[in-house]
Structures are given as C-alpha cells and as structure tokens.
Image (spheres, rainbow, N blue to C red):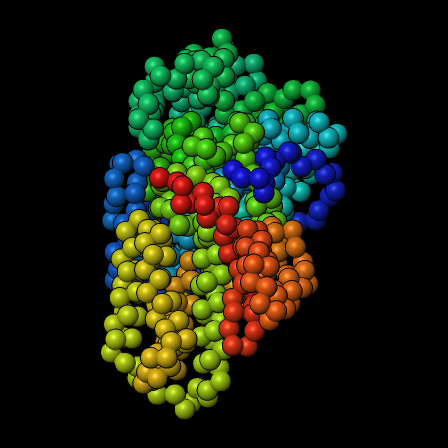
Amino acid sequence: MGTLLKYYRPFFSTRTLQLGTHRFNNPKRRIRCLSTSSSHSQPSIDVATKSESPASSELWLHNTMSRKKELFKPKIEGKVGMYVCGVTAYDLSHIGHARVYVTFDVLYRYLRHLGYQVTYVRNFTDVDDKIIARANELGEDPISLSRRYCEEFNRDMEYLHCLPPSVEPRVSDHMPQIIDMIKQIIENGHAYGVDGDVYFSVDKFPDYGRLSGRKLEDNRAGERVTVDSRKKNPADFALWKSAKEGEPFWDSPWGPGRPGWHIECSAMSAAYLGYSFDIHGGGMDLVFPHHENEIAQSCAACKQSDISYWIHNGFVTIDSEKMSKSLGNFFTIRQVIDLYHPLALRLFLLGTHYQSPINYSDVQLESTSERIFYIFQTLYDCESVVSQHDVPTLKDTIPPEIVESINKFYNVFVTSMSDDLHSSVVFGALSDPLKTMNDLLHTRKGKKQALRIESLAALEKITRNVLSILGLLPASYAEILQQLREKALKRAKLTEDQVLQKIEERTAARKNKEYEKSDTIRKNLAAVGITLMDNPDGTTWRPAVPLAIQEQQVASP
C-alpha cells in the first residue's frame, strides 16, 4: 500500500446511533422440518420484485460443494432463496467485507434482472465473544454497541450501492429459534450437554468435512477449535455456551447462556427460507469451520436440509497476505472512500472475478478512479449532446454498425455474467461503446455521421442499463464527476481555486513564451494526479493517475 492510507486503528467512539429503516424481523413461528417443496414454497416474508419468468439465458455458478460450475436451477421455478452470512458487528467494516457484500449484491441484482423473485437474507451477528470483549473495553452494553455498528455497516452498504436485503435478522432477536434447533439436534442424538454447555458431536455426522474437503483428524485441538477436555472429540464445537460473569445471557433448558457462533445462521436461514433453499454464500474464510458446521447442524436438526449452491468469494490481500482484523493489516471502507469515490471502490472490487484474490493498492484505486471518471465523462457528454434535441423528432432507426456494436456489447454482458458472474469481462467490453461514443462526440468524421444523435442515445441507454444492473449507476453524471474531482483534489491536497490559479499562471507563462515555467506547472500538477487539457475555449483539468504511480505501473512486471 502506498502512503495515502495508513492501517486502520479501531474506532472507539461511544456515541449512540438510532437504527434506520432496515427490518430486523423476529418470526413468531417455530422452525419446522418440512420437505423441500413445502418449506421453500411458503416463505416467511413477502418480497416485491419482478414477477416475470426468468429469461432464457442459462446461469452457471461455481459450487464450492461440487468444486465445479453448475447450471443454476432453483428449487421453486421463478423464485430464489439466498442466505449470506453477515458481519459480526463490533467495529467498522473493512474492504474485505465490502468485497463479500458487493459480490452478492451483484448476484442479487443479476438474478432479479433475469426475472427471479429473490428472497435475500443477510444476518447480523450481535452476540459474540468479540462484541463482548469490545463492549467491556468501552464499558458499554454489548447489544447497544453492536446495534451502533449494524447501523454503520448499513451506511457503508448504501455508499457502495448495495441494495438492502429482503430481511436482516439479528441473533439477539432469534433466541427461541436457536434454542429450538439445539433441542432438536440433541433429540436427534447429535449433541450433548456438559455443565451448562452444549456441544455438537462431529462423530455422529459422517459427512463432516464434505464442503471443505478436510478430514476429521485434521481438526487438531487449538487450531480453529477450542481446547476443552470435556469434549468427546476435540473437533466438537459449541452450540450453547453457559453464562459467564459480565456477559449477556438468555435462559435455556441447559441453564443461562448464549449461542455458539455457528448455530445462529442455521437457525435464522431456516426461519426465513426453510431448511431447503437455493444459495448460501460468504467469504472463502467461512468454508471452514463456519459453513461446514452449519451443514452439520442443519442436517442434524432436519434430515431434509439441503442447500443447492454454496458460493464463496476470494480474499482481498495486502502484499499478497489476506486482509483481516486479526492481522491488523486492513483498511476500513470509510478510510478508502474518504479518499476515493465509493463507486470507484465498487468497480475495483468487481474488476476481478469474485473467486480470485484481489491485491489492494493505491495503484489499483487510482487507475480505477481514472477509469470511472472516463466512463461518466463520456456518458455526461453524450447526455448533454442528446438533450439538445427533441426526442419526438429523433428517428427510431440507427446505423447497422451501431446496432452491431450494441448487440455485441449486450451479448458479452449476458454471456459473461451468466458464466459465473464474470463482471471483469463486461468492463473490458465496455471500452468499445465508450470509444464509439467519443468518436461520435469529438472526431470530425463522427460529427458528420448519419443518425449521430440517435446513435448516441442508443449507446448511452445500453451502457446505462448495464451499469445499473451492476450497481454502478450514480444519481446523475454531473454529480459523480464533481464528486470524483473533489476526491482527486483531496488526494492531491489542493483546492480547486489553487488549481485554477495554477492554470492562470501557466496561461500567462505560455503567453509570455516562458515554456519551461509552463511545463513545470503542468508536471507539478500531473505529479499529484491533476491533468491539464488545452482546448480552443481554454484550459480545463481532470483527475488522473499521479505520475509517480504511473511509473510504478510501468515498472511492474
């Protein structure tokens, strides 16, 4: 990482925030173990989404369970149930979290684009060891602290254009469902109690390790599993933890206590989607132990438990090392978007296939910021020219070569997104319509082309529609261009007045034939990411990759 950002230090503010409008439902009904058709055909919430039948395009997704791409076939035609593990809310979220939720937001959006009705459930963990430890440090109630960071997380998601899920359940609101599931697991002979604690017996579940590919003997005590001599097997994990002094607790048949980490997602996914649904997702770090344990718990509670597709995204790395809070090498979303536009961060995260690791750096963010400025400057110029003409007077035909360009781009979009969400291929293909728009806007030949305005309108429309599906469409082109300029000025540690003053000085130097001084002004601004553009009407500026970073790009193999 370059010098613009420093590693994050935990946020210790104790101010209290009220919850926004996000729904944290607490279903009153008990979780029932039903057949595939009945459990999923009677969802516990209503979702207002598209009602059309899915498009004919086939969607293929990589399934961690089978370790290959599979054709997506929902359990109920036209409907999709998707559960994504949410954050443990005790601190500000980092860009590793951003990658998870941007990835599944794109999947959510694309499924809806294909015409599916999607019930998207994403939980909050608000009862956890880390939350309790942080609350004790601050002398704050753990639930109150977690509620505050839930709200901060939702703000981050709004900045990143992530749509709200259908429902956002919290652990503290679902104790009856969690306790019921633990009771069922015990009754089915897959768990046992010890001094107020309840452990899942991995020996009772022969398929344990099927998702991760790990063998039971690989789970040595002290490596992701708590050392406890009371366990029948060192790999057994806690379903219920007995109350300890200074910790929140709830009454249960085994005495006061709180749930283990893994049981919460099994209980909440079953509460909203049933035991059998389509997609379960999260970061690659959740494959083991979290999702492995979820499978064991859910199957132990209900033999009909069946999730069709397990989907996991790759890590964000710093110098090829996984970004994480435990390693202390992470950057919060807030830190990054303080200097870079949130849509630049979103584009950066989508510029690599979701399964592959991304190495985070200033170089990458600067390049992405320049790219997104170019995209929206082109669309702004296009919109400005088209708006000067009355829509009713425009012809409803465009030249064959423009039709071919639009169809080619849209076909790449559908083909790539339907092939396991290859958004990076879409962004590569975006170069062609953008170039065509710029040719029509600025070249002598393009300005003379027949049906020029109609062509610009059609190209802008298809580009806008694709960006909207990918969650990259701003409120207005003019607004995001101004925001990108402001971020560039902040990184350059300049004000716009200072840049305009430098432009005036350079104009005077050129008039006086002081070309060395003129070049120096240009180079000094370019060094901090401000590029000057001379045209017949004068000199303007735009954000660009700073010269030093450009040199790093050239030097990189």
92, 287: nearer the viewer: 92
Against 2, residue 481 (above or below) is below
Percent position (x, y) of residue 430?
35, 62
Percent position (x, y) of residue 484?
56, 59
Against 215, residue 105 (above or below) is below
Task: Give the quadrant of residue 299.
Answer: top left
299, 111: nearer the viewer: 111
475, 555: nearer the viewer: 555
Percent position (x, y) of residue 234?
43, 13
Against 268, residue 350 (above or below) is below
The residue sitting at the bottom extreme is: 393
Task: Give the quadrant of residue 3.
Answer: top right
Which residue is at a point 48% across and 30% down the rendered structure image? Answer: 262
Percent position (x, y) of residue 39?
38, 46
Question: Is residue 503 among the parts visible in the rendering?
Answer: no
Answer with left or right where residue 232 lies relative to residue 245. left
Answer with left or right where residue 315 lies relative to residue 478. left
362, 266: nearer the viewer: 362
Question: Is residue 489 among the parts visible in the rendering?
Answer: yes
The residue sitting at the front extreme is: 513
The residue sitting at the top extreme is: 229
Which residue is at a point 54% across and 27% down the rendered structure image? Answer: 326
Which residue is at a point 46% across and 48% down the rendered structure image? Answer: 550
Against 17, residue 536 (above or below) is below
Quadrant where the C terminus lies? top left
Which residue is at a point 42% across and 17% down the rendered structure image? Answer: 235
Answer with left or right where residue 53 lies relative to residue 555. left
